[in-house]
Amino acid sequence: MTFSLALSDEQQQLRDWAHEFSLKVIRPAAFDWDDREETPRPILQEAAGIGLYGHDILMTLLEDATGQGFPILAEELFWGDAGIALSIMGSTLAAVGIIASGTAEQTAHWVPQCYGTDKDVKVGAFCSSEPEAGSDVANMLTTAKYDEASDEWVISGQKAWVTNGGVADVLVVQAVVEPGLGARGQAAFVMSANTAGIAAPRKLRKHGLRASNTADIFFDGVRVPGSALLGGKDKLDENLARARERRKTSQQAAMATFELSRPTVGAMAVGVARAAYEYALDYAKERVVFGRPIIEKQAISFLLADIATEIDAARLLVRRAAWMGATGQKFASAEGSMSKLKAGRVAVWTTERAIQILGGNGYTREYPVERMHRDAKVFDIFEGTEQIQQLVIARSITGLRLQ
C-alpha cells in the first residue's frame, strides 16, 4: 500500500461529520465546560446518539487499513475543543488497551462497556502512570498477586494522572506481576471501577483540558477474578518464562497501547494548533491598527505563513506515522515519536503566537486562544514527554543506548 494523503469517500465523510459536530455542538459549549471543570456527559450522550462515541465507530476506525481514521477524527474533534474532545476520545485508550492485550472474548465483553449506549453512556480509563513511574514504566510499583486458591488477582498501588479517573466505569490497569523482570514482568487487567477497594478521592485541578476529568486512583487489595487478566494466564506464564530466559516476549501492554495511540495524540495537537491559527488569521483580517488591518503588516502575515507551514509539516509526520503503524512498516527512525514531538511543539508554539497576534485580547478569557494555549501544553507532557520522544529518536538514529 502506497502512502497518500488523498482521502477516500469514507474518510472525507468522517472528517466532515466530525467537523460539523465540533462546529455545532462542541465549540458553543467549550467555554462553559472549561469553566465548570467537569466531564461533559450531555455532549458524550449527543456524540453517542449520532455514532461518534461508541464501540461501532472504534471498530470502524481500527479497520481503516490506511491508519488515517483516528488522526482524521482526532484533529477535527480537537479543533472544536481539546478538553471536550479528550472526554469523547478518552475511553478509546482503555478500549484499545483491551484490544491490544485481551482475548477475543474479553474484547467482546469489555470494549462495549467502555462506552455504554446513547441512553446510558459509560466511560473507560487506562491506568498506567504512577507518581514515580510516568515515562519510566519499568519503575512501576502497583502489584498484582495471584491467589491460586480462589483464582483471583489482588491488586495494590496507586495510579496517577488518569484520564477519566474518578468518573470511569471500566478500568484497564497495568501492574507488576513479577518485580524482578522490570517492564517485562507486567500485565494488564480489566475491571469495573465499582470493584471493592478502588478509590479516586479527588480530581486534579489542571492548567488545561479542564473539561476532561483527571484523577489519581488507589487500589487497596482489590480482588478481581482470574478472567480479568488480559490475554489470560497461559499467555502471561509463557511471556514470563521467556522473559526469565531473556527471550523475546509479546509487547508489554502499556507500550503496545501507546504505540497505537501516539500518532493520534499528534493529530490532537494538530487540531488545537489549527484552531488557534484559523482564529488568529480571521482576527488579523478584521483588527484595524493605524488605519489598516494588521494582516497587511509583514510581521503578522509572515508569522501566519510560518504557522501554516509548521501545521502542515506536523500533519504530514502524523499521517505518515499512522500509515506506517497500520501497514506494518518498520519505524526505522522512530517516526511515531517524531510525529508526536513535532506536533506537540507546533501546538504550543502556534497557540502562543496566536495570543501574540491578538495582543491584550488574546490574554483574556473572552477569546478562545487563551484556552487553546493552556490546552496545548499537555502535548509536551502526556503520552511521553518531549524529552522522552527526543530520547527515543536519538536512540533510534544513533543505535546507542543513550540515557
Image (tube, rainbow, N blue to C red):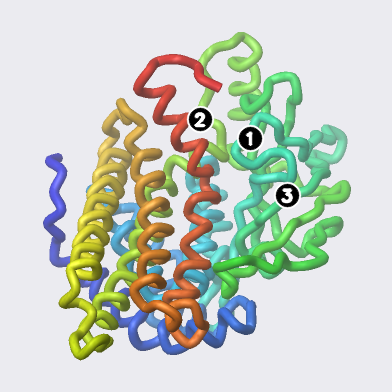
Please identify the quarter of the rendering in which residue 338 is found.
top left
Image quarter where the C terminus lies is: top right
> Taking 137 as reference, is 131 above or below it?
below
Relative placement, left or right, of 224 versus 161 is right
Give the mark nearest the N terminus, 1 or 2: 1
Separation (CA) of disc 2 from disc 3: 21 Å
Give the secondary structure at mark 3: strand
Whichever of labels 1 and 3 marks the residue nearer the N terminus, that label is 1
Marking on residue 159: 3
Give the Cα distance between marks 1 and 2.
13 Å
Residue 156 screen position, x and y as percent: 83, 44
Residue pointed to by mark 2: 251
| Element assignment for label 2 | loop
Looking at the image, do the residues carrying marks 1 and 2 touch, with CB atoms under 8 Å apart?
no
Q: Are marks 1 and 3 in contact (CB under 8 Å)?
A: no
119, above or below 402, in the image: below
Q: Which residue lies furthest to the front in this view?
A: 290
Amino acid identity at mark 1: Val
Label count reads: 3
Q: In which quarter of the image is the N terminus?
A: top left
Q: Three-letter amino acid code at disc 3?
A: Lys
Give the percent coordinates (x, y) of residue 13: 21, 72
Q: In this view, does 64 lie to the left or right of 236?
A: left
Q: Residue at x 27, y 32 (%)?
A: 329
Instruction: Name the residue that disc number 1 marks.
Output: 137
